Structure formats: C-alpha cells, structure tokens
Image (tube, rainbow, N blue to C red):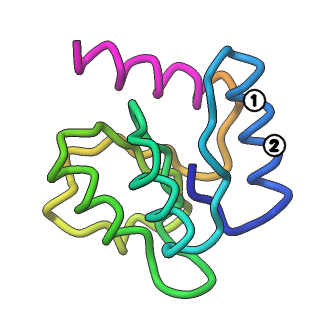
C-alpha cells in the first residue's frame, strides 16, 4: 500500500487488515514502496497517485510488467497516465467499504 499521509495510511491499513488483508507497508515514498514490492511480491496494490515527492506511477508500471493488479486512490485523476486508464480508481474521500469492495473486485477479476 502506498500512501504518503501518515493518518490516512494508518486508517487504510487498519481497514484492510480488519477485512483480512495482509498489508505490505504502508509506504509513503516511491523508493520504500518499490523495496517492499521487490522483497515480497504483492497479490495486489493500492496506490496513492500523488506523493509528497513525485508519483507512484513508476510502481504502477513495475506492477503492470509483472501482471500484478493495482488500483489508484486519489483526489487528482489528472496525473494518471493513459497507459493506466484501465486501472480502477477510488476518488478520495471514500468510505472503507468502497476500498474493500474495489480490492475484492480487482482480485476477483484476476482469477
């Protein structure tokens, strides 16, 4: 999970763990997220697009190259490259149930 706001990151992590998801991270920086992903390939990823420094788009590319599904959670969809237009997007703010449903749909689609 990539989220640069510490409070949002903790909330998202708690939401996902409560739903039974094993969470890698959260990571607030692209470099940290890349290290986590390389160390333990995730089944799927939740990416905040805009980070304090840069974006998570390089990680999205890395995940796509490995056929690892991901979704974006953001308030600014203008940063999402056309190459990732098929990726699901949760617009901030969203409810915890929306995140769980979007992640479940993403994983179900990959089966």
Q: Residue 3 location in percent, x, y?
A: 63, 60
Residue 96, given in percent of the width and then of the height, sits at 70, 29
Looking at the image, which is closer to me, 39 or 85?
Answer: 39
Is residue 105 part of the magenta span, yes or no? yes
Horizontally, residue 50 falls left or right of residue 22, namely: left
Give the residue at x 70% y 33%: 95
Which numbered circle lies on residue 102? none
Label 1 SS: helix
SS majority, magenta? helix
Q: Quadrant of the C terminus?
A: top left
Q: Disc 2 to disc 1, how far (Cα)?
A: 6 Å
Q: Are marks 2 and 1 in contact (CB under 8 Å)?
A: yes
| Residue at which label 1 appears | 15
In this figure, which residue is indicated by the disc labeled 2? 11
Which one is in front, 98 or 7?
7
Task: Residue at 67% x, 68% y: name it.
Answer: 4
């Amino acid at each position: 999970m990539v989220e640069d706001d510490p409070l949002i990151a903790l909330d998202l992590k708690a939401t996902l763990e409560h739903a039974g998801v094993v969470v890698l991270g959260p990571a607030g920086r692209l470099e940290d997220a890349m290290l986590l992903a390389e160390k333990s390939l995730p089944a799927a990823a939740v990416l905040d697009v805009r980070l304090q420094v840069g974006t998570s788009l390089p990680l999205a590319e890395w995940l796509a190259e490995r056929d690892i599904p991901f979704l974006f959670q953001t308030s600014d969809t203008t940063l999402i490259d056309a190459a990732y237009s098929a990726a699901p997007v949760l617009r901030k703010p969203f409810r915890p149930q929306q995140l769980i449903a979007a992640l479940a749909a993403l994983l179900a689609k990959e089966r």
